[in-house]
Image: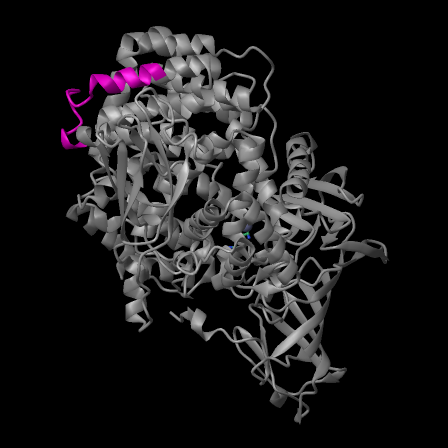
Amino acid sequence: LDTIYLKDYAPPAWLIDKLDLHVAIHEEYTEVRGMLACRRNPAGPGGELVLDGEELALQELSLGGTALVDSDYTLDDDTLCIRAVRGAALPDHFTLETRVRIDPDSNTQLSGLYRSRDGYFSQCEAQGFRRISFFPDRPDIMARFSCTIEAERQDFPQLLSNGNLVASGTLGNTRHWARWEDPYAKPCYLFALVAAKLDMLEDSFVTRSGRVVRLAVYVEPGKLDQCGHAMSALKKSMSWDEQRFGLEMDLDHYMIVAVGDFNMGAMENKGLNIFNTKYVLARPDTATDSDYQNIDRVIAHEYFHNWTGNRVTCRDWFQLSLKEGLTVFRDQEFSADTHSSAVTRIQSVRQLRIAQFPEDAGPMAHPIRPVSYAEINNFYTATVYEKGAEVVRMIHTLIGRDAFRHGMDLYFQRHDGQAVTCEDFVAAMQDASGLDLSQFRRWYSRAGTPHLKAEGCYDAAVQRYTLTLSQSLAPTAYEQRLQDAGLAIEEGPLHIPVALGLVLPDGSDALEREYPAGTCVLSLTESTQRFVFDHIPAEPVASVLRGFSAPVHLDFPQSDAELAHLMAYDSDACNRWEAGQRLASRVLLAGVAAGGQDTAWIPESFVAAVDRVLDDGMRHDAALAAEALILPAEQVLAEEMAGRGQIIDPEAIHRSRLTLRHHLAARLRDKFEAAWQALAPSSPYAPDGLQVGRRALRNLALGYLAESDEAYLKGHVMPRLMAQCNADNMTDVIAALGTLANLDVAERTTALADFYTRWQDEALVVDKWLQVQATSRLPGTAMRVRALMGHGAFDIKNPNKVYALVRAFCAANPRHFHGADGEGYRLAADVILQLQAMNPQVAARIARAFDRWRQFDSERQSHARTQLERIQGSTNLARDVAEVVGNALG
Ligand code: B3K
Ligand code: ZN
């Protein structure tokens, strides 16, 4: 495997000022002509002009009108190097003309230009543009693009590209063309092209400086009734970015196109976002509350990229977190400001723990700015995105909201129109705030989740509370890789913002008078540091890492009573939730240790705490109560075990969690019943915060009621579950169906069959049907997933189907994926082997399911190793998969 290193970065020898593309789509092939205005880079290293190109059949190549001869250039599988023009040296400026043929109809990778049901769509990030035309495919080459598209008028009435439509016309009887010009220079990964038959929802937005922007959402014919929410999310995002960051839309057109075949969520192409249908289409009966929320988030995310990513882009792909971490931070802030900030934060933290912490502890561990990669598509990770956002958030926490805003302003003043590095971002934040961030920069080059150890001590005689904090960060697989490559390993403590509150026995905040919201932000910069607080009238319970102020593991041996105190009184909602999670983890891991069978390990105080939270949820904030009552995920408990040096026992974890659920269901049945009654809908469905919270808590209660003894289940719960399968909104339907999918009852089969009959033509709803079955806890799930792969509803070429069935099984059903018989591993390997030739990006994502294989018992390890070696030994092993599997076995 060839490895690319950050240290080898060199500026390009040639710049491309303009690219004029002409794309002619024919039934048998597509022809792409490119005119590249090339200029020697005065700051470059000199040398030949190197263009990337993959699966392009070169038809013509000329320079300034002179056809090039064989000795002028070399062409291999992935590069075209131009050395001379008819033997003479290249001039400093010239136009290069290329003509190639491509075959989008057989492009199953979904990178470059490809065919989907309703037409042709492009995906260029990270390196798809080279599959469309010869070009230096690197983000630090920014060119002005124009693009003429030509295709059959009937089949492809919409011809779209970035920027403004400047001309269009017909060609003969059946063909038409359109010419687009993008006024902004951009890297080629932001290029987009669509030629398709779609319906359109149109609207407009007036920016605060009075510019009218035409907005359009394009969807598959017949789905106009499912794009209203996306449009309103777009308008909300536009206003929010003006208000919070002073950032306006800079184009006359902003288009969103939804496509059902798409490798990831969405893509921020300049003025022409292309989206997975999953993040556009929604109607109350087809989409759940969390779908609605995800649409808000992803629409906002792609819109925010227009500034953080497009106007200011990345110098090279090692800087990916410059745009992704920052843009995730921005979309999180948007969600916080437009929904509940506490719920948003809790959900982000949960996601970080489920996906990023394990990544940071596994064989693919890397810092938010990695220094090497074999396949860049493998680095669109939870670390680059979610931990990247945490790093930006820590800067925000350290310098404060106003200085952060000044830092953003300065960043744009300095770098608008440029391709820059993470260092440039931190420098702007440092200069705007005056805070020295030199030590903080270590977060960009360190992998792994640090441990933060806390120890509190109260001296009643002098009313003094002392908190001792220490940090440690053990080497990860990443340091091993650095060492193997002979690269330097960074050391030294990190700069960690620790938001702290001191909660007094009466529940009030001891630091209320000195600090806003009673929270002070400590800067931990040493390995160990002591912080002293005077005039503390009584022994407080420390609330450490309020708002989860740093992405670390907290080791703080607080008693159950202290955690219960925080759960009840902490003024920081995130830490109230956190206290509950810590308490629940403690109980569940005691259950694991006890074999999970009897219930002696379940303390009465825990039942009482759940009881209180339920009461509270019925009276006050249902959404927060629902979050509090979601027990720590099996994956999170697994990581806790691994973190303690224990072998992960997925069976015992599952059993422990299930036993606790049964116990709570039995002990608190009346309370769950009361909640279910009290939270019944009183107004027509709307995905607003209040209703979302009520539905979440009500369905959580129903889920617990379904854990009741058989008689109660049959007599009282089953009729409700079956009735709810016909609710008018998908949130309630899927809650009922998901619950039924876990139960070994005849109604399960009926409900699943009815659901499929009703929704078989609605692709995204079928995905849900696959997913509830893939994540079922019933025995035999691996076999059923395999059977479903043969069902007409499944299509291995469609990433959404693979994610709904296979990835859901591998990533969200740990007990069955890690089944002792090795069936789960074999299934994953079979899919990876089949998929890698078609779509290596998606295959590599599935392969990440093996990340934690070494933390399991020797029998499971041997099953996993067998499958990993089987993949590694396959002929035509894809680079994407090779990197993931190679690291796993490494
Ligand atoms: N920037 C794209 C992700 C591209 C992934 C390429 N494998 C979407 C986003 O983060 O907004
Ligand atoms: Zn992004």
Image: 192 above or below 621: below
| Quarter containing the C terminus | bottom left
Residue at 29 percent of width and 28 percent of height: 540
What residue is rendered at 37% in x and 19% in y?
703
Which residue occupies the foreground of this view, 634 or 519?
519
Quarter holding the N terminus?
A: bottom left
Which residue extends farthest front? 462
Give the x, y percent position of residue 446.
Answer: 36, 58
Residue 260 percent location from the top left of the image: 58, 43
Q: Which residues are magenta?
A: 592-612
Q: Using the image as rendered, state which of residue 801 and residue 528 is in the foreground.
A: 528
Q: On screen, 310 above or below 828?
A: below
Q: Does residue 106 show up?
A: yes
Q: Is residue 761 visible?
A: no
Which residue is drawn at the image coordinates 28% and 70% (left, top)?
484
Is residue 596 located in the magenta-colored stretch of the structure?
A: yes
